[in-house]
Amino acid sequence: MNEQRAKRDPEGTRRRILEAATEQFTRFGLAGARVDAIATAAGTNERMLYYYFASKEGLYVAVLEAMYVQFAEREQRLDLSGLQPAEAVRELAQSIWAHFRENPQWLSLINNENLHEGRYLERSSRLRETISPVVDLLRATLERGAATGQFRQGIDPLDFYVTLVGMGYYIVSNRFTIDIFTGRNYAEERRQEAISAMHLDMLLTWLRPTS
């Protein structure tokens, strides 16, 4: 693709660069990803990559932002307001855990950024905007449950969200080492269903008011 064509379709070019970069960063991390390989896979050239993203690091941050935006948009599309509070928590948890299972690239990118101690995500001006709507969605659900006596009072929605996410994240991100260490393959559907059911029971039991 020449530069003139790229400039006539800036959104398409930017999207293709992001898709190609996601693949490169997932496979090779920030250090190992090659700008020329990204440009070739996107059907453009390195000049256009720098035109849109300024640097390889800038492109890496853009990939991380896009990943978190996609995740947040999926959760915001859930209609939890018409569900009973316990069922709403169940729906949100299952949606998040399914996202992890369906998007192994997501986990690879997060793990890579944790190796960098989050220093590139810290540059993002958009990141915190993506998590707020999801936590607000959960906050409203927890408040509805507390108001009707189904949930305990005073639950911190961010703490609960991080706990919920962590349950699903660990099983997927560590599935290979867990399999080798324990001999149990949590990539199998029946194993996923069993441990998800256990996690949900744990979460919902903890939410109940104490006597």
Image: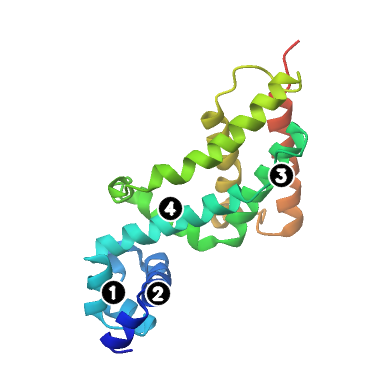
**Residue 110: which numbered mark, if any?**
4
Q: Nearer the viewer, residue 4 or 203?
A: 4
Residue at 42% of width from left, 53% of height from top?
Answer: 111
Is label 3 in contact with label 4 (beta carbons under 8 Å)? no
Which mark is in front, 3 or 1? 3
Q: Which of 108 and 132 is in front in this view?
A: 132
Work out which quarter of the rendered image holds the C terminus and state it: top right
Q: Residues within 10 Å of mark 3 (few under 14, many from 20)?
A: some
Q: Distance between the residues labelled 4 and 1?
A: 19 Å
Q: How far apart are marks 2 and 3 (CA)?
A: 32 Å
**Residue 100: which numbered mark, if any?**
none
Q: How far apart are marks 3 and 4 (CA)?
A: 23 Å
**188 versus 141 height, above or below:** below
Q: Distance between the residues labelled 4 and 2?
A: 17 Å
Task: Tell me: 57 left or right of 162.
Answer: left
Q: What residue type is labelled 1?
A: Arg
Which mark is in front, 3 or 4? 3
For label 4, the SS is helix
Q: Which of 130 and 167 is in front in this view?
A: 130
Q: What residue type is labelled 2?
A: Ala
Rendered location of residue 22, percent (x, y): 41, 67
Residue at 69% of width from left, 37% of height from top?
Answer: 89
**Residue 20: which numbered mark, if any?**
2
Q: Distance between the residues labelled 2 and 1?
A: 11 Å
**Residue 34: which numbered mark, if any?**
1
